[in-house]
Image (cartoon, grey):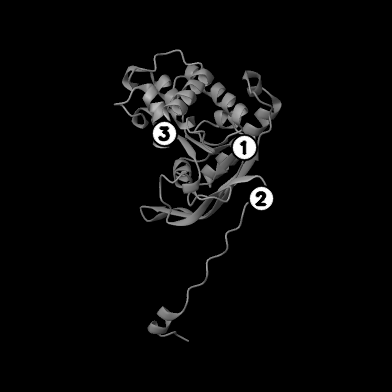
Amino acid sequence: MRVPDGLARRMPSAPPEPFKPGPHGTHITVRGLSKTFAGAALYRNFDLDLPKGKITAIFGPNGCGKSTLINMISGLIRPEAGEVLFDGKTLRETSIGYVFQNYRDAMLPWKRAIDNIRYPLQLAGKSKAEVDARVDQLIASFDVTFDLKRYPYELSGGQQQLISIMRALAPEPEVLFLDEPFSALDYEMTLFMREKLQEIYRATQLTMVLVSHDLEEAVFLADEILLLTKRPTNIAEVVPFRAARPRVDATLASEEFVRIKQHCLEVFQREVRR
């Protein structure tokens, strides 16, 4: 029987499904995330649980929306539907850091390097003494030897990205998002940054979410590799990698690393051909 239009408008809509928390140890809980681009679904009712105190690397086919995913979780892009909670809290109640791929655009060019690092602390209303103490701590932690009173355009690409990472870490965030942070760096600086990222993790046990287009890098750095499908994007597989830290050159030649990388590659190729 056809329901009259007027009556249909008065009928209550179905109540939304209750939010389902993730398993024990989950930090970021994503439920029902949806996003379309140019009329085509990129994500449709997407669910995800990211572990607390772990590094999760996101890897998948070109165009599957890896960066879009962390941009929606971190609040940089608004999803069309869905909910994200951090330890049961909203994004507004959570401190996050974000390291962009394009460090040149991410830096504030009118501020000196050291003032770029100070900026989020000043926004948070920290006193000068608190700001100076935190910046000194970061300088020591990263063993910075170049002049931080220079402007970004006077620094190398690696130095600019180092400043971007220090700035993201300055407010001691609960979660650090990294969007292909080493893709524009030379190999020597990439190795240095991988080492520093591991040192940060070992010192803080900070939850990190890393987007990478380099499978070797993703496996090397991560506790879990989140493999995505082609669009509409879903989870192909979550692959754990439990190698001891710090991970070093020998890790790359270990039997377990080679096995995990090969498995991830097989899943990736299956999705690309699908």
In-image side of 49 versus 76 (left or right): right
Q: Position of residue 232 (x, y in %)?
A: 48, 52
Q: Give the spatial CA distance, label 1 vs label 3.
A: 23 Å
Q: Residue at x 62, y 27 (%)?
A: 202
Crowding near the residue tagged with mark 2, few <14, some 14–19, many ≥20 C-alpha atoms within 10 Å: few
Q: Amino acid at mark 2?
A: Pro
Front one among 251 and 40: 251
In-image side of 229 versus 113 (left or right): right
In-image side of 255 versus 140 (left or right): right
Q: Position of residue 218 (x, y in %)?
A: 56, 32
Q: Secondary structure at mark 2?
A: loop
Q: Give the spatial CA distance, label 3 vs label 2.
A: 32 Å
Residue 270 appears in which quarter of the rendering? top right
Q: Amino acid at mark 1?
A: Gly
Q: Residue furthest left?
A: 110
Q: Position of residue 86 (x, y in %)?
A: 55, 47
Q: Give the spatial CA distance, label 2 vs label 1.
A: 14 Å
Which of the two discs, 1 and 3, labels the residue nearer the N terminus?
1
* Residue 198 visible here: yes
Residue for badge 3: 120
Q: Nearer the viewer, mark 3 or mark 2?
A: 3
